[in-house]
Each structure stands twice: as C-alpha cells, then as structure tokens.
Image (spheres, grey):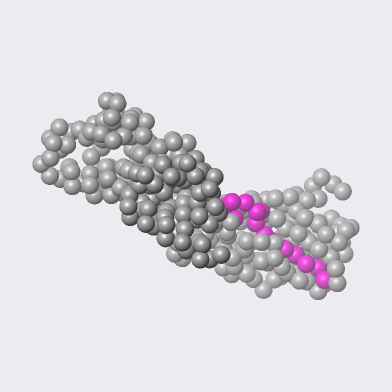
Amino acid sequence: MSEWAHRVETTPRLAQWRIDILSSTYRKSDPFKIGIWNWFLTVERNKQLFVKLYPEVSALTREQPPVASFVIKLISSSSSPSRKTLVHPGVSDKLIRTNEDFVWAVDTLFTGRFIVDVEFLDLKIVPPSGGEAVSIWSAYQIERHSLSTAITSLSRMLSDSILTDITITGTDGASIGAHRAVLAARSPVFRSMFSHDLKEKSLSAVDISDMPFDACRTFLGYVYGDFRADDFLAHRLALLRAADKYDMEDLKEACHESLLEDIDAKNVLERLQTAHLYRLQRLKSGCFRYLVNFGKVYEIRDEFNAFLLHADRELITEIFQEVLAAWKGF
C-alpha cells in the first residue's frame, strides 16, 4: 500500500481523502488538522459502507469538543461525466467527541477509486466561561488573540517595571514595583486603600508584612496574569492568606481547589487547620474523609493527639462529630 494511502489533503475548511482501492474491510486516515483540532476519517466495508469523522482524543477535545457543521460527499474517481457522487443530507451544529458521534451508512458500495470529501461550513466551541457555542472562524479567534496579547502586555508591565507607581515590600525587605490601577481592579481592598487618605496612598508603598518576597512576587504574578504553576504550588498557603486578606475570591478558590488535590498524611492536619481558619468547607470535608473514612488517623496517632492539644474547640467538636458519625455507619 502506498505511503500516501492514508494521507488527507486539506485547505483551511476542506478535507479530501483519496482512496485508490479499498482492499480491506477497514481503513483509517492519518490525522489532519481543520480548525484547532486534529481529525480522522475511517471507512469500513460490511453490508454497507460506513464513513466516520471524529476528532483526535486529546485534552482539547475533552475540554472543548467541536460543534461541527459540514457537508460530506463520496465521489468516484472516474473522469467520465457520469461519475458517481453521493452527498450526505448535511450536518449542522453537531457536537462530536468520539468516533461514534458521526457515522454515515452508505448503501452503495464503491468498488473502485473514490474520494471522501468533507467541507466544513463552521466549527464552533463553547467558551471556557460557558454560554452559547461560538464559531472559531469568527470574532472568537480575534477575541482570544486580543486577550492573550493583553495578558502578555500586562505581565510585561510587572516584569519590566513599566511606569510603576507603587512599591510592594515583603517581610524580608525586598520590593517590587507595581501599578495602583491594576491592584485596585483586582482587589476591592487595594481599591479602598488607594482611594482614601491612607499611608499606602501617600507613601506610594504597601508593606505586605506576612509574605516573604518570593510569595509576594507569585501573588503579583497571579494578579498580572503571569501564572507559573511551580511557584503557585510552592506558595499556596501564603497565596490563600493574601487572597483572604485582599478579598480576591478567584485566587482563594484556586488555592482551595489546589489544596484539595494532594491531601496526604504529612499535610492533612495543616490542611484541616487551614480549612477551618479560612472557612473552606470542601477542604475540611476532604480532610475529615481522609482521616476518618479512610482510617488514616490511626497512622498519625501521635501527631493527631498533639494537634488536638492546640486546635480550636469548635474544630475539635467537629472532628469528634465526624468520628461518631463514622462509627454509627459501621
């Protein structure tokens, strides 16, 4: 079989797969890119000819599957004017995730050379924020580009100290320049601070007395869209404190979600105390479940007993209520 037998030729919206001879009962194309997804075509010959079109399995397909509108045809490769063409009735705004979401069963068997011709009329995607699906070939792509460019420019304002007008200082005395307008837009606490005659406004300086500089830099990076995963993970607790202090609910929830993901015997008691202090109910429930339902409290008995000596009375009451509820469940 020729090395080109599985290749699909494409333009931005058109794909053509030329099949010389369907010598076996099944054939699958090489991946081809239309829009932001890689796609596959397959043909299978049984009592009918089955044609499938589907996107490649990937994180993108799982998170943002295509909503496709297209016309698909089977065209015999004969050069005569009477060459055979079969046209599917058409597909409009169909969500396609798997290789079973679009299957065309053709009664006529093509025995010679033929072409699978797919013309994409539109490809839509549901924005991460939800709502109606929008075309990737319309203003959506421009919007994404504009957003990406804006975030890059914003992060450069911080990294390159472009026209900074406020100084942020951490506990170790190190400082970094920032912008009042950006901080005020992200935090109502900063907005109030810079709108009233407080020392931060008159001195053009903010001392964040409970954050070392590295954590402070990570905090500002998040504010400016300069997100770095390793730094975020290293400073989650400091970021949570800052989010609570400066009333940044999006950052607080991001920390909450992250702290839920890696509860273990070494950190569960610290996480439990953190959850109680910052009213993170899902984190608290996750810690209770780890300790009580999965019986891990017995593996850290000494640490747990020491924890109870200093824990808040309300939290201790909740712990024993969880233990009693678990015992009743057996």
Tally of marks: 0
Q: Is residue 69 above or below residue 255?
A: below
Residue 147 is at least partly visible in this image: no
Q: Is 187 placed left or right of 93 in the picture?
A: left
Q: Is residue 217 above or below residue 47?
A: above
- Look at the image and tell me in which quarter the C terminus lies: bottom right
Q: Is residue 209 above or below residue 102?
A: above
Instruction: Give the percent coordinates (x, y) of residue 122.
Output: 56, 62
Residue 165 position by quadrant: top left
Q: Is 274 placed left or right of 133 in the picture?
A: left
Instruction: Give the percent coordinates (x, y) of residue 324.
Output: 46, 61
Residue at (36, 34) in percent of width and height: 215
Residue at (81, 50) in percent of width and height: 5
Q: Is 325 placed left or right of 115 in the picture?
A: left
| In front of the other: 12 or 151 | 151
Residue 226 position by quadrant: top left
Instruction: Give the percent coordinates (x, y) of residue 209.
Output: 25, 34
Q: Residue furthest right?
A: 23
| In front of the other: 170 or 200 | 170
For the magenta stretch, what is the residue range? 48-61
Residue at (43, 39) in percent of width and height: 232
Residue 242 is at least partly visible in this image: yes
Instruction: Give the percent coordinates (x, y) of residue 166.
Output: 22, 34
Q: Is residue 59 magenta?
A: yes
Q: Is residue 202 magenta?
A: no
| In front of the other: 19 or 146 | 146
